[in-house]
Each structure stands twice: as structure tokens, then as C-alpha cells.
Amino acid sequence: MTFRAPVHAASIGRAVPLPRRWSVRAADVLALALGNGLLIALMWVRHGGPDQLDSPAGWLTAVGQLTALFGTYLILIELILMSRSPWLDQLFGMDRLAAAHHWIGFGAVWLLLAHGVTTIGGYGLGDGQNAIAEAWILATTYPFVLWAVAGMALFGAVAVSSIRAARRRVSYETWHGIHLYAYLAVALTFAHQLVVGADFSDDPVARLYWIALYVATAGIILAFRFGQPIRLSLRHRLRVANVVREGPGVVSIYLAGRDIDRLAIRSGQYLNLRFLTRDGWWRGHPFSISAAPNGQWLRVTVKDLGDDSAGLQRIPVGTRVYAEGPYGGLTDTRRTRSRVLLIAGGIGITPLRALLEELPVRRGEMTLIYRARRPQDVVFRAELDAIARLNGATVHYLVGQRGTPAVPDDPLGPASLSSLVPDARERDVYLCGPEPMMEAVRRTLRVLGVPARQIHSERFAF
Amino acid sequence: MPKRAVIAIVTTALALVLLLSFKTPDSSALRSTGNGGNLPAATSGVAAGTSAPGVAAGTSAPGVAGGTAAPTPAATGQATLAPAAGGLADGTVMGPALDTRFGPVQVQVTVANGKVTDVTALQLPFDRSRSAQISQYAEPILRSEALQAQTAKIDLVSGATYTSDAYAQSLQAALDQAHA
């Protein structure tokens, strides 16, 4: 069974259900997070935390308790931010969740480090021991504290590997592998909290609450990181149905499977795909679907970026595919206006190619600007033109090096953009491309006065 | 999967096995080595019989009465008293057990020739490792303070204010009884 996109793709009727929309609001999530934070603070006060503030040792111990409670709470939030929860994806988008995860992570590790230091200091001051002796006493005589020390070291490794300078030096796979140790760290640090932690060792209610926080977090991770993708993969049994070369180093991979017309996904969304080959099964990558779902196949389009996306250029037909998702909010659901502007840079065309096909617009209301360095980097040209003819969209190709006759000096600058699309302020702008290009376009759009809520973009950087 | 990942997983598993096999001395061990070992054994037979804190709580009367050579038989069932020069009756007197946030505190005072010769902590907080740790280091300090002061007007040990406070109160009550 092989597939090839018909050139008039837009004529295929839509037969696919839409992903469920959740009625949860950002304010609800924020209230839940802050509410639990408040509860934790009150618990500490109720357990007499502030009573310790009558001596330097007490101060240090109190700070040690607070940093432990909130550092741990932030760690649980970290896990939930990366749990692939569809609620959070819908509300914030995975890219913003990942950015929040990055910074909250550093905060959490600093807090936990401070917990270790102040607890050693506070106990040591109380016992009249120096820091090294007290640290030794804590690790060797307090139950499960040695496990926690090991867990702390792992948290530290995860944080260090995520510092920008370190992150640049190691491959994504190595960095991700180190990151998985965070789960181990969470497990190792758990026991000492219940046994040694002043707030839990003799208050069964508090202990129950704390365990419930962990159980809820684990449940969310199991449901959305594992349960949902396993169910999707068992149900649809996706396989590579065809591989088509689109240009130099760019291939489209067609996926087919059982009941694929029941796989709910929107144009503009992406799937995290693992191709179950000898060398590919252990790593997944996000791929936007590059054609509107049509009930017969899904298509992703991959550019050889020099990493393992090179191997995908020759993926055998029939390869089984494990899919997580769909994720992403670069979709029709973000629409606020009737007129639309799509701006693509390079391989960033993939989600916009699907949107061009699927967004409901009247004739003349949609414009696509497609920027590429070299003519051979333009993919889907025939498809884009065919879709434009059908739905009355306008497509501008800005191809070539800057300053050549075909391309103005600043092709995506305010002057160029406003001459191509004079009414940009009246449009929703969907943006996808390399990060520097997206940053430049955002600046342009601000200059042109396009309100931020009309600008929709998503980064695929994990 | 690359060889490096396999090596990492195997190494992690081995490290975990080692780590999880490490056992801290459990709290009961801490209790006996920490406290029983450190607490001064009182001279009288009373303290010797009830040295394990936490056990002594309600079991005072019979053991105590059998204590020292007292001219009069046990007056209160709590103490064996002998009037002496300093106004304190010779013998051993048990203070009341006072509850703190971290557990009960109870002391026993030994008086010889009208002077406080020993203060034994019958109970100190050992409900969790931190309390045990605190009790362990605070007790000798409180004891020597009490022996020096010969009264319950002793300084609080920093980091162990609750324990110190209760210690002083229990000691005060014991001394009051010895005066009577």
C-alpha cells in the first residue's frame, strides 16, 4: 500500500474527528498550583515551623524545611509540566511549558541544594558539630538520607547538563538520557521526607496529603506519557506506507493504519514519532503533519538536519511507528480574525502547508509568505499552488539570498511585509521557521502593530 | 540503542543495588546506644532499674520504694525521703512526665547529704531521628547545668528549647518534692 498526495489535496473531504477541547482555563491551573503552595505553607506554620525562629540554628533549620517543601513541590510541578497533559498543551503549548520547565527546574534544584546546606548548618549549629561532621551524621545515621543525597546529586547533574553552555556540547540524546535520571532522583528523595521530615513524621494527615501529591503526579505522567500513546498505537497500528522525496534532503513519510479516519488530529499539530527500527525505536522526534488529515493517511515531512533525521531519508516502507500526540496549538482554534497570514521559513512550511489546506477562509482572505534560501529548498510548490487556486489564497515565494533582485534586503522586515500584506493588522498570523527568523518576524509584526494575541507560533525545541 | 546507553543503565542498576542495601541504624538502636549509653547511670538502685527512657514512665512506685536506706518508709510512693541539712531529703525523686511537641520529658533526681548528686533523664523525645539527635546532645549539658546550679534555674540549650524547658520544669517539681 503506497500513497502519494494528490496535487489537488484540498479537494479531499475531511473525514477525521477533531481532538477534544477541554474547558479548563489557565486561571484554574494557576489557582490549583498556588492553592497547593499556600496549603504547604500553612501546614508548615501549623506544625510549629515559625516557633523555631528563636535561635540561629532554628532559623537555619526552618529555612531548610521551607526550601525542602517548596523545592519538592516545584519538582512535582516540573514533572507535570512535561507530562504531555493535553490540558496544559491546549492552554500553554508544549514550547512554553518546556521553557517554564527549564527555569522552574533551576529554581527547584537551587532550593533543594539550599535545603541540604541549611539543614546541615542548622543541625550542626544545634549539635555543636562542624558542617562535615554533621553532614556525615545526617547521611549515615538518619534513615534514607543517604538515598536523598544520591538523589540530590542526580538532580544536580540534570541541572548542570541543562545549562546552556553544557547543553550545546552534548547531543540531544545524551542530555535527554541524563534528564531521565530525574525520575530516579524523585524516587530516591521521597522516603527521607516521610521519615525524617518534621512535617510528615508525626502527622498522618500531612503525610497522606504529601503522598497524594506524588500519586496524582505519577498518575498524570502514566496516563499521558504512557497510557495515551500506547492506546493510540495499539488502536491504529501506524506504519510507514510510503516515502517520497520532496527535494534535496527532504522526504515526506506517509503513515497509514487501522481506523486512521478515527485518529483525531488538526492541521498545525504534530506527533512525536518513534520509528520502530533497530536503531530508531529508542528516540522520538516531533513532526508536524504536512497535509490536512484526510482519513486515509497522515503525512509528515522531514528535512535531513545532519542528526538521525538523516536515517529517516531511507526508512523502509512497512516500518511500524509508535506515535505520541497529537500535540500543539498552532491550529484553527487560535483564530481570532477572518483573515489569515501564514509565514513560513524553510522546512517550517510543514504545519503551514496543512493549515493552508484546512483553515476555513473566504477567497482572498489567506496569504502565505514562504521564505527559503535556495530555490531547491522550496518544497510542496505544486501542492501550494494547487491549494491556492482552489481556496483563493495568495502565495508569495521569497527565494534567494538577501539583496538579490528577487529578494529585498530585509525580506521579512516591515517595509517588505507591509507591501506584500498591507492589512497585516487585521489578520491572524501563523508563524513557523527557524528561531532567529521567527524572532525577526515577531519584531516586524510588532512594528506593524499586529496585536500579540493574533500572532501564533510554536517552537519545536525540546 | 547505543552501547553507551546500555552501559549507563547497567551501571545505574549496580549503583542502585549498592545504595539500597545501605542500612542506617534504625531508631530503636539509636535509642539504646544514643541514650542508654550516654545517660549517666544513677547511683541508687532506682535509676538503675529504670534507666531505659520511654519505659520508665508509669512504672515508678515499686522500683523506687525499694531504693535507698531511708529511715521512713516510702511516703508518697514516688520517692524515698530522708531529711538532711540542705533542706533536701536524701533519696531519689521522680519528676512528672511533661509532654512537649516532640515527646515526653521526665527526670529523676538523686539527693545525698542534702545535695543533688545526680539527675537522670528517664524520658526524652525520641519520636524521630532528629529528636533523638537533639536529646542525645542536650541531655549531658542539661544534667551538668543542673548539678552545678543545684536548682532548676538552668540555661536553655539552644536548638533544644522545648526539651530544656520541660527538663527544667520536671526537675523543679522533683526538687519541690524533695523539699517537702
Image (cartoon, rainbow, N blue to C red):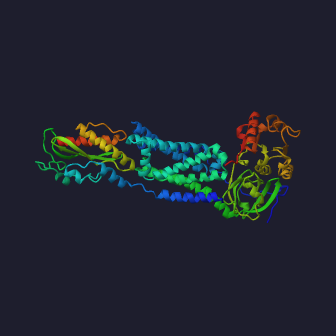
The x and y percentages for residue A298 are: 75, 58
Pick the front one: A140 or B102: A140
Residue B2 appears in view: yes
* Residue A268 to residue B115: above or below: below
Q: How many marks?
A: 0
Q: Tell me what residue is drawn at x 88 percent, y 40 percent.
A: A406
Residue at the right extreme of this rendering: A405
- Asked if residue B59 lies left or right of residue A423, the reply is left
On the image, the x and y values in percent for residue B92 come to 19, 47
Q: A223 or B149, which is in the foreground?
A: B149
User: Furthest-left residue in view?
Assistant: B71
Q: Which image quarter: residue A284? A: bottom right
Residue B35's x, y, as percent? 31, 50
Comparing A331 with A78, the one in front is: A78
Assign the N terminus of chain A to one quadrant of the image.
Answer: bottom right
Confirm whether residue A294 shows in the render: no
Q: Does residue B71 appear to the left or right of A430 in the view shown?
A: left
Residue A140's spot in the image, x, y percent?
A: 43, 51
Q: Give the quadrant of residue A438.
A: top right
Which residue shows up at 52% across the image and 51% down it?
A151
* Depicted A419 relative to depicted B49: above or below: above
